[in-house]
Each structure stands twice: as structure tokens, then as C-alpha cells.
């Protein structure tokens, strides 16, 4: 009888802990989304820089009499990366630090930002052209990481709603 009572008490404690975790929501999940977003932006910048370096290192391009023009064009590659601002970063940071009961409005606002950012990415023609060239000639997709991060963030925000 004593053994059953101990198990019941232990089970009740586990259930309370599970309920508390569920009720509080996981700020950690939002912190991970924030990290994913920041990493995807850094990775994209690094991929663009790497693509620029490969273009400038290509022997055929270096031998071309228009190499100075190529250097000038390559120096503008990073400017083609869409500027998203800090709004999504701030929204995810807020979600990571808010109590569960106060997250609904911020989650909706974050999803709208993700939609806006995806629209920016979809309409960034010069970046899309650069990514296409990079993928065709060097096998490096410049847009994919940003797009995948935004899709993952949106999916997690939708799931949490």
C-alpha cells in the first residue's frame, strides 16, 4: 500500500511538471528560432562573400580584359542581400521572454513579419539573379537558407498558436 502511494505521489508530480511546462510554453523554442534566423543571415552573407571570392579567383575571369568591371560588379554582391531589419529578431526575442499567456498577439505579429520577409525575399530580383548564377556556375544556393529559416519559423509559430 505504501509503495502504491509513493508511485501516485511521484506520478502526480510528473503530471504537474508536464502541465506547468505545457502551460508556460517554451521560451526556449523561440530562442532557438531566433538563433536559426540569425545563423541563416550570417550564412547567407558568408555564402555571398564566398561566391564573390570564387568569381574573382576564377582564372578565365581574371584573364578577361574586363576584369576591372567584374571586380566592381562583385563588390556590390553583398548589397543585393535583402535588408530585413531587426523586427523579426526583436519579435522572436520578445516571444522567448514573455509568459505563455501573453504571447498570442506577439506570435501573430511575428507571423506577419515572416510573411513580409518572405515577400521581400520573393521580390528581390537582383539577389534572385545572383543566386541563380551562383547555383548554375558554383552550385551554391544563396536564397535557400533564408527561405528555409523563414519557413521553419513560420511553421513553428503556426504550430504554437
Image: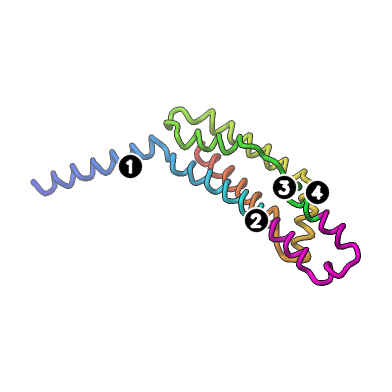
Question: Mark 2 touching mark 1, by CB under 8 A?
Answer: no
User: How far separated are the C-alphas under marks 2 and 1?
Assistant: 41 Å
In this image, 41 relative to 97: left or right? right
User: How far separated are the C-alphas under marks 3 and 1?
Assistant: 43 Å
Answer with mark 3 or mark 4, whichever residue precedes in sequence.
3
Which of discs 1 and 4 lies nearer the camera? The answer is: 4
Q: Which residues are magenta?
A: 46-73
Circle on res. 119: none
User: How far separated are the C-alphas under marks 4 and 2?
Assistant: 17 Å
Answer with mark 1 or mark 4, whichever residue precedes in sequence.
1
Q: Is residue 108 above or below residue 136?
A: above
Classify mark 4: helix, strand or loop: helix
Which residue appears at 42% of the width and 38% of the height?
25
Q: Residues within 10 Å of mark 3 (few under 14, many from 20)?
A: many
Which residue appears at 47% of the width and 37% of the height?
96
User: How far separated are the C-alphas under marks 3 and 4?
Assistant: 8 Å
**Disc 3 target residue:** 81
**Disc 4 target residue:** 126
Answer with mark 3 or mark 1, whichever residue precedes in sequence.
1
**Disc 1 target residue:** 18
Which of discs 4 and 2 lies nearer the camera? The answer is: 2
**Disc 2 target residue:** 46
Q: How many marks?
A: 4
Residue with the most extreme left position: 2
Colouring rule applied to residues = rainbow
Which of discs 3 and 1 lies nearer the camera? The answer is: 3
Where is residue 45 shown, x and y percent of the image? 66, 52
In this image, 24 relative to 31: left or right? left
User: How far separated are the C-alphas under marks 1 and 4?
Assistant: 49 Å
Answer with mark 2 or mark 3, whichever residue precedes in sequence.
2
Which residue appears at 81% of the width and 58% of the height?
71
Residue 66 is drawn in which quadrant?
A: bottom right
Amino acid at each position: 500500500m505504501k509503495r502504491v502511494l509513493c508511485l501516485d505521489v511521484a506520478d502526480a508530480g510528473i503530471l504537474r511538471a508536464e502541465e506547468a511546462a505545457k502551460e508556460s510554453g517554451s521560451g526556449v523554442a523561440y530562442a532557438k528560432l531566433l538563433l536559426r534566423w540569425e545563423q541563416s543571415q550570417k550564412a547567407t552573407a558568408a555564402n555571398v562573400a564566398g561566391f564573390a571570392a570564387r568569381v574573382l579567383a576564377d582564372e578565365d575571369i581574371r584573364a578577361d580584359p574586363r576584369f576591372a568591371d567584374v571586380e566592381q560588379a562583385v563588390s556590390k554582391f553583398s548589397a543585393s542581400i535583402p535588408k530585413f531589419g531587426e523586427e523579426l529578431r526583436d519579435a522572436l526575442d520578445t516571444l522567448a521572454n514573455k509568459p505563455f499567456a501573453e504571447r498570442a498577439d506577439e506570435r501573430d505579429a511575428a507571423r506577419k513579419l515572416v510573411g513580409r520577409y518572405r515577400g521581400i525575399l520573393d521580390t528581390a530580383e537582383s539577389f534572385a539573379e545572383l543566386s541563380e548564377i551562383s547555383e548554375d556556375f558554383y552550385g551554391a544556393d544563396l536564397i535557400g537558407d533564408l527561405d528555409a529559416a523563414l519557413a521553419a519559423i513560420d511553421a513553428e509559430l503556426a504550430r504554437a498558436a
